[in-house]
Image (cartoon, coloured by chain):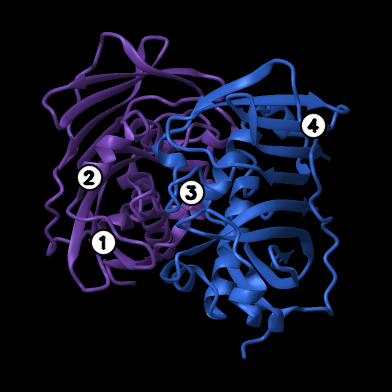
Chain colours: A purple, B blue
Amino acid sequence: MLPKLGSFTFHIDSYVCDFKGKATLPVIGDFILQAATMHASERGFGYETMVKEYTAWVLSRLSIEMYEYPAYDEDIVIETWIEDVSRFFTQRCFRFVNGSQQTIGYARTIWAAIDMTTRRPVDILAWKGEIADYIETERDCPAKKPEKIPAVDGETIHEYTVKYSDIDINRHVNSVKYIEHLVNVFDLEMFKNNDIGTFEIVYLTEGMFGDKLSIYQQARSANEYLMDVKKDGLSVCRSRIVWK
Amino acid sequence: MLPKLGSFTFHIDSYVCDFKGKATLPVIGDFILQAATMHASERGFGYETMVKEYTAWVLSRLSIEMYEYPAYDEDIVIETWIEDVSRFFTQRCFRFVNGSQQTIGYARTIWAAIDMTTRRPVDILAWKGEIADYIETERDCPAKKPEKIPAVDGETIHEYTVKYSDIDINRHVNSVKYIEHLVNVFDLEMFKNNDIGTFEIVYLTEGMFGDKLSIYQQARSANEYLMDVKKDGLSVCRSRIVWK
């Protein structure tokens, strides 16, 4: 049996950096998904195994706490482990470590497994009970469990039609693409003086090619925002962003 | 002295794949830039050296010929070499090789070097004449030299405001982001039945945060399109796309 903890190194090349020379939040999101995929694949419950059994992991919720963003030409190590498995959800945690061995952030994800034919949830414990053998109880993850996020109404601040490059191998809008569209709502001035410290997202339904998505935003304070991405008035995903 | 040829391996993970399970053209463009960056860095004329001397490489033109797109979980090897250096331009070629050692495509890029303070071209031969030592004359690159592309007028088919995630470490719209916006103009039906076989792009001026970009398109035939990305009526970049 492989160790419970997986550890994956990513290099910050210039093409994943923003104008400040730091990796962007969508790129951190992409690394999280890559680390989760590799950890699961190595342990026999990754994409390849799932697809053969007409099952897919679906990211349900994600929360990220970034103390510092990795800079151009740095390496970042992402450690990931399974914190919990129940019938319909599994919780996976992440720690981000920079080249000086400093912890620069944490993340927590909640996943469901769905039957690709019926699109209905699969009983994870009945289907792959051995995942529970990998539960790591010794590690602490300070990123909070992503909770429900209230709806936002009012006027839409951005409208977007889903395009080719939004759609991934699962034939719906890629989870990371929502993060990109959400952070793009903010002005460059905000990024010049601040960083996103806390990011939470709750995925509620799938976005498809050609869907007209509307983004709603509610400022709770000068640095905390609730966001809601809707299709025909119904939430596709909701997010909470806290700047620091 | 390092060999003239550089060879870099990329893995096609699910997050760089489109709905067909193949790497997208923007991702191929990103790999090309990564391979160019690594080849140049290893040989002493990469980003780090440049930035210290207030100089930057600017991609001027790019042409890609794809016979086949790499699929999910495959490795793709990108070989790159310098074909020519003149006072103001250097030409760099690329060959794409899949896991079965088959050539699946070629690309050719033309670069200028600019002084970051004046934004004026730098005399490459006077500045880093040793680049000429790396010219590889033994290899053939079937991707054609990217030529001028005529302007396209008429009605705009897509309008786009430049956002945070478009802007890179050089504080302008990233070269690959234009490719993403250009391919996004096409309907999913086109991608279902066809692949982009030839892609050419000529970069004419810089796009900045908040710029309102308009995309113009002219069909030369059912599978050949000229595209023009304009800002205030002036071309920022032009592209030719041939589907197969």
User: Nearest the camera: A164 or B139?
Assistant: B139
Name the residue beneath numbered marker 4.
Answer: B225
Task: Report the Cα–Cα distance between label 2 and label 1.
Answer: 37 Å
User: Nearest the camera: A50 or A106?
Assistant: A106
> Could you tell me which residue is drawn at 70 percent across and 84 percent down?
B133
> Could you tell me which residue is drawn at 11 percent across and 26 percent down?
A221
The chain identifier of the residue carrying mark 3 reads: A
| Secondary structure category for the residue under label 2 | loop
Q: Position of residue B149 (x, y in %)?
A: 79, 39
Does mark 3 fall on the same chain as mark 4? no
| Secondary structure category for the residue under label 1 | helix
Task: Report the Cα–Cα distance between label 4 and label 3.
Answer: 39 Å
> Is the C-beta separation of discs 4 and 1 under 8 Å?
no
Query: Mark 2 against mark 3, which lies toward the viewer?
Result: 2
Name the residue beneath numbered marker 2.
Answer: A195
> Could you tell me which residue is drawn at 84 percent across and 80 percent down?
B138
Q: Earlier in the sequence, mark 3 or mark 1?
A: 3
Name the residue beneath numbered marker 1.
Answer: A133
Mark 1 nearby-residue class (10 Å; few <14, some 14–19, many ≥20) = few
Name the residue beneath numbered marker 3.
Answer: A50
Q: Earlier in the sequence, mark 2 or mark 1?
A: 1
Q: Amino acid at mark 1?
A: Asp
